[in-house]
Amino acid sequence: MAKENTFHVGLIVIELHIPYSHSLKEKRMALRSLKDILGKQYNVSVNEVGFQDNWQRAQIACSAVSNEVKRLQQLQAKIESYIIDYVDAELIYCDLEIL
């Protein structure tokens, strides 16, 4: 009988305030850059999931799969630190949900 593998899906929901954005076009340019960096650097899938019509507020979600919850928690911490240190936006919250 084959051993059953356990895996976990992590959903990281991030809300940002982008004070320098004065149009949806500026906001989407900033988010496109952030989404590309997070996807490549942290191997996560990223999409804008909320506040699409608000030009100074954004909500994105990152998803990842791991066999360990601890790895997903570490990933969330790394993404949160990256945003705080390198993104020209205010981090409102960064929450991890394990599915």
Image (tube, helix red, strand yellow):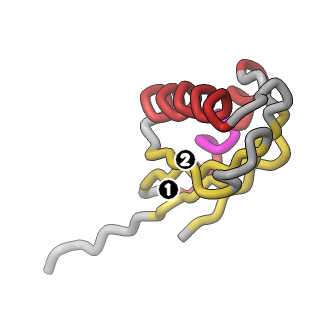
Mark 2 lies on residue: 71
How many other residues sit within 10 Å of disc 1, few (<14), some (14-19) or many (≥20)? few
Expressed as whole percent of the image width and height from the top left, the position of residue 71 reads 55, 47
Is residue 90 or residue 57 the one in the foreground?
57
Q: 44 above or below 42?
A: below
Q: 29 above or below 54?
A: above
Q: Secondary structure at mark 2?
A: helix
- Tell me, yes or no, whether the highlighted magenta stretch contains residue 77: yes
Q: Which amino acid type is shown beneath numbered disc 2?
A: Arg
Is residue 36 or residue 55 the one in the foreground?
55
Mark 2 and mark 1 in contact? Answer it, CB < 8 Å. Answer: yes
Expressed as whole percent of the image width and height from the top left, the position of residue 67 reads 42, 57
Q: Which amino acid type is shown beneath numbered disc 1?
A: Glu
Q: Main secondary structure of the magenta part?
A: helix
Q: Residue at x 66, y 27 (%)?
A: 26
Count of numbered tags: 2
Q: Residue at x 53, y 34 (%)?
A: 35
Magenta residues span: 74-79
How many other residues sit within 10 Å of disc 2, few (<14), some (14-19) or many (≥20)? some
Left or right, 93 with reference to 13? right
Expressed as whole percent of the image width and height from the top left, the position of residue 36 reads 47, 29
Q: Residue at x 14, y 80 (%)?
A: 1
Is residue 45 or residue 59 the one in the foreground?
59
Mark 1 lies on residue: 68
